[in-house]
């Protein structure tokens, strides 16, 4: 059950339009499918430093105290509510610059890595949510954290690549339907609120 909950939370967080999604969409719209897949891979690669830093710190923090656990839990609730508010408020989440010129794969990768490397959403996600799905009393807590982080990275690549390939396939339609984008924003916001309420009511 915990793995399913983690996967659902990961899907909502990854699929919510953010800097990484916008970058992948822009690559697909301006340079085609190949560039969108390269951009998705680059954004996924940018997650690695967050994983290393977070797992190293959480391995000790999870065993500290119940108070530390509660702090992490409510930080997660606050972040989910913030994401709900930001998702509704940001009406230009899928604005794309179509003036892009051909770029090398190396440049696409560097930009994608920097986008997710500097994305605070990732650090907060790992610190706030990873502890919810790891039992610190078990001897294999660290390998489980690494495994869950790997799942997050895999989902990120698949979802971002799907966004980019879709954008490359339906170029004009992605940015020309404001009603569809408004509906998507409201759906994502509602999902964040629901997840926040569930997290707030959950026990250790």
Image (spheres, rainbow, N blue to C red):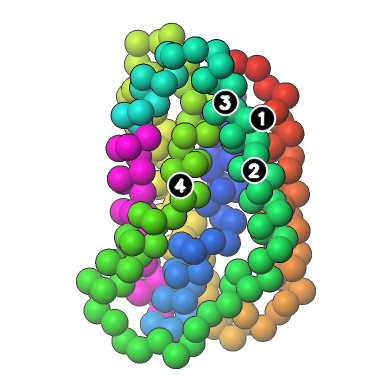
Return the x and y of residue 137 as percentages of the image width and height: 43, 9
- The answer to whether marks 4 and 3 mark residues whose Cβ atoms lie closer than 8 Å is no
Residue at (42% x, 33% y) in the render: 148
Q: Which secondary structure lies at badge 3? A: helix
In the picture, the disc for residue 122 is 4
Q: Nearer the viewer, residue 168 or 106?
A: 106
Q: Nearer the viewer, mark 3 or mark 1?
A: 3
The residue that disc 2 covers is: 80
Q: Which secondary structure lies at badge 1? A: helix
Q: Nearer the viewer, mark 4 or mark 3?
A: 3
Q: Residues within 10 Å of mark 3 (few under 14, many from 20)?
A: few
Q: Nearer the viewer, residue 123 or 130?
A: 123
Image height check: is 80 above or below 26?
above
Q: CA separation, marks 4 and 2? A: 13 Å
Q: Main secondary structure of the magenta part?
A: helix
Return the x and y of residue 96 as percentages of the image width and height: 53, 80
Among numbered discs 4 and 3, the one appearing first in the sequence: 3
Q: CA separation, marks 4 and 3? A: 18 Å
Confirm whether the magenta stretch covers residue 95.
no
Q: CA separation, marks 2 and 3? A: 14 Å
Residue at (76% x, 64% y) in the render: 183
Q: CA separation, marks 4 and 1? A: 18 Å
The residue that disc 3 covers is: 71
Residue 4 in view of the camera: no
């Amino acid at each position: 059950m915990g793995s399913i909950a983690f996967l659902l939370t990961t899907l909502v967080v990854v699929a919510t339009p953010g800097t990484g999604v916008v970058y992948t969409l822009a690559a697909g719209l301006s340079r085609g499918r190949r560039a969108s897949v390269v951009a998705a891979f680059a954004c996924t690669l940018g997650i690695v430093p967050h994983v290393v830093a977070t797992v190293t710190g959480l391995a000790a923090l999870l065993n500290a105290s119940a108070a530390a656990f509660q702090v992490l839990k409510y930080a997660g609730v606050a972040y989910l509510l913030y994401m709900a508010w930001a998702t509704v408020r940001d009406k230009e989440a899928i604005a794309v610059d179509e003036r892009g010129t051909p770029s090398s794969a190396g440049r696409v990768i560097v930009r994608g890595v920097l986008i997710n490397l500097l994305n605070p959403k990732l650090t907060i996600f790992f610190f706030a949510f990873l502890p919810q799905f790891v039992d610190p009393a078990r001897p294999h807590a660290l390998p489980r954290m690494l495994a869950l982080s790997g799942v997050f990275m895999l989902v990120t690549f698949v979802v971002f690549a799907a966004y980019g390939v879709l954008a490359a396939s339906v170029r004009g339609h992605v940015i020309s339907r404001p009603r569809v984008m408004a509906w998507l924003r409201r759906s994502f916001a509602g999902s964040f609120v629901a997840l926040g309420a569930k997290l707030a009511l959950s026990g250790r």
